[in-house]
Image (tube, rainbow, N blue to C red):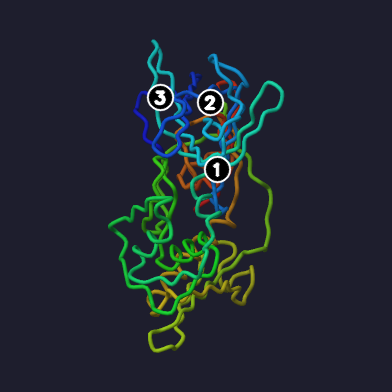
Amino acid sequence: MIGLSAEALSVLTGSYELYQRVESWLGGQLLADDVPIDAATEETDRGIRVPERLTLTVPRRAGGRSWSPVADDHPLAANGQRLRVQLGIGLGNGRVEWIQRGWFVIRDSGTEGDAVNVEAVGLLALLEEARLVSPFQPAGTLASTLRALVEPALTAVVDVGLTDRAVPAGINWDEDRLAAVWELIDAWPADAHVTEDGYLSVRPATQPTTPLLSLTNGTGGTIITASGSSTRDEAYNVVVARGTAPDGGQVQGVAYNYDGPKAYGGDFNPLPVPFFYSSPLLTTVAQCRQAAATRLATLKRRTSREFKVVMVPHPGIQVGDVVAVTTDDYTGLPCSVEALTLPYVAGGGSQTLKVRALA
């Protein structure tokens, strides 16, 4: 969760004024310090390759200038222009507490009548579109290989809690740069996301369980509903991770899910339901076991109980945050925020969250 003062957090429990400030940058040059906004919505889903998407509606003319992207260096053109988004929380008496929501690269913009419609996406889109021109053969360590793949488009910040290790010889990635990044992250194993400051943060793949916010159905305009859906699709209770030892032999690690409704050996299926994962970056049994356990935790989270939350916008919430959900059936149930929709403009509607139970 983006840090907020105690005063701002208290304001968010009731009615408050929400402000926004959108800057446009090209390289190191500020093109516009306050893009006028009629409507704006952020959508983020941690289950897709590029999680963030931002849509803006901008008046065609405002502040004595045209906001139609008629020139290559226009603030709303799609030639590398990046949007820096800040949101403000009104504290009363003219005071506003500002937080940075994130950086987005403009993907598309066009004029329709008196409005300019802008679509921007998270910075991982730079890696998704930058496919490898020739096969990439990594050398050095996991950290140095990661930086070689993402920089200078993104700056990778690797947590000191991660153990770096050498990359095996003979690995070859053909075209998909972003897929190579995620393969490296999974094999480490680690977790990665682009921060609100625009850095690629790489940290140990541990699921936090301490709630940062409590959400109660029927309190403060919050409505929480269970999804009412259940499926066997992609519901695995065993993960098998395989790699290649330095002598060329196969190494393998297995992780089992022993709890929950889809536990191994339970009513879900008395036989194992495995997910197979392999990577040449795994060279020991210990590495395979660790990667298998991390992947199993992710798979469990993606198929756990799902709730939809409709609430007054909270500009500090991010995907991956843990919230405590209270309904008629649950009290303080820890849940992970998997997806969100956040309106940036006052009166733009409620915020929605998709959360999944961690217990």
Q: Percent from the top left, x then y, of residue 170?
A: 43, 79
**Residue drawn 44% across the image and 37% down it:** 213
Q: Which residue is drawn at the image coordinates 44% and 72% (left, top)?
A: 137
Determine which residue is flagged by label 1.
121
Crowding at mark 1 (Cα within 10 Å: few <14, some 14-19, many 20+): many
Instruction: Quadrant for the N terminus, please.
Output: top left
For the residues labelled 1 and 2, the Cα–Cα distance comes to: 31 Å
Residue corresponding to mark 3: 10
Mark with earlier residue (1, 2)? 1
Identify the disc placed on residue 160: none
Residue 200 position, x and y percent, is: 40, 50
Label 1 and label 3: CA atoms lie apart by: 31 Å
**Label number found at residue 220:** 2
Q: Nearer the viewer, residue 303 or 42?
A: 42
Identified by mark 2, the residue type is: Gly
> Which amino acid does the dot numbered 1 rest on?
Val
**Coordinates of residue 161 in the picture (x, y in percent):** 29, 59
As drawn, 54 above or below 157: above
Q: Nearer the viewer, mark 1 or mark 2?
A: 1
Q: Secondary structure at mark 2?
A: loop
Q: Which residue, as the protein is rendered here, is positioned at the far front? A: 71
Q: CA distance from mark 2 to mark 3?
A: 12 Å
The residue nearer to you, when weighing 183 against 110, is: 110
Amino acid found under the numbered disc labelled 3? Ser
> Residue 4 appears in which quarter of the rendering?
top left
Answer yes or no: do the residues labelled 1 and 2 have beta carbons within 8 Å? no
Residue density around tag 3, few if under 14, some if 14–19, many if 20 or more, within 10 Å: few
Where 27 falls versus 147 (above or below)?
above
Instruction: Report the mark closest to the observer, 2 or 3.
Output: 3
